[in-house]
Amino acid sequence: MRRTSQWKDRRKVVAWPVFPGYVFARFTVRDVHTVLTTPGVSTIIRTNGRPAPIPDEELESIRTVVRVVEETGTAPVLRPLVTEGDRVVVTSGPFRGVSGYVVQLRGRCRILVGITSVGQGLELEVSSGALKRID
């Protein structure tokens, strides 16, 4: 995506990766070794030990977002993808370091921080951008 970067003496529009640190590629399982030995590649995202395919619909949605962003100038914000039931940790703000479970997603996230052995918890409202999923 193109975005404006500010230096001390000037501003310039530069190309910026949508997902910094990631490169998307089409390859077969037979090509895994070749991909991993490519300079700059450190790993392949995996699910259950196998390369994780990304559905074409998701990639097309990202392409559409990038096109609209460039046409309109609106700026999306990169956020971690969390869903209800995910175990998360708060990464910023007054609740930094607190972990819990996402119980509701509507604008701001509601997470449940609890003690399972006594069956009680506290519900907090935090920004989804302040959450990191714990696998």
Image (cartoon, grey):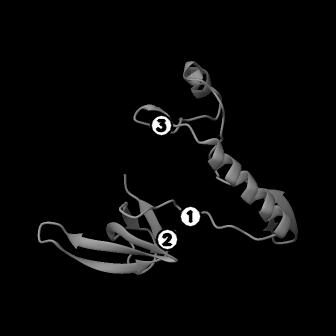
User: Helix, strand, or loop for circle 1?
Assistant: loop
* Residue 3 at x, y percent in the picture: 79, 64
Mark nearer the N terminus (3 vs 2): 3
Q: Is residue 9 above or below residue 1?
A: below
Along the line of sight, the residue nearer the viewer: 89 or 62 = 62
Q: Amino acid at mark 1?
A: Arg
User: Helix, strand, or loop for circle 3?
Assistant: strand
How far, Cα to Cα, is label 3 from label 1? 20 Å
Disc marking residue 128: 2
The image quarter containing residue 120 is bottom left
Q: Are marks 2 and 1 in contact (CB under 8 Å)?
A: yes
Find disc 1 in the rendering and name its residue.
Answer: 79
Disc marking residue 46: 3
Along the line of sight, the residue nearer the viewer: 125 or 12 = 125
Q: Which residue is located at x 56 percent, y 35 percent?
A: 42
Q: Residues within 10 Å of mark 1 (few under 14, many from 20)?
A: few
Q: Is residue 89 visible?
A: yes
Q: Amino acid at mark 3?
A: Arg
Q: Is residue 2 visible?
A: no
Determine the residue located farthest toward the front in the rendered image. 57
* Residue 80 at x, y percent in the picture: 52, 61
Q: Amino acid at mark 2?
A: Ser
* Residue 63 at x, y percent in the picture: 74, 52
Q: Are marks 3 and 1 in contact (CB under 8 Å)?
A: no
In the image, taking residue 66 as reference, residue 52 lies left or right, namely: left
Q: Which residue is located at x 64 percent, y 67 percent?
A: 77
The image quarter containing residue 10 is bottom right
Mark nearer the N terminus (2 vs 1): 1
Q: Is residue 135 above or below residue 130?
A: above
How far, Cα to Cα, is label 2 from label 1? 7 Å
Q: Are marks 3 and 2 in contact (CB under 8 Å)?
A: no
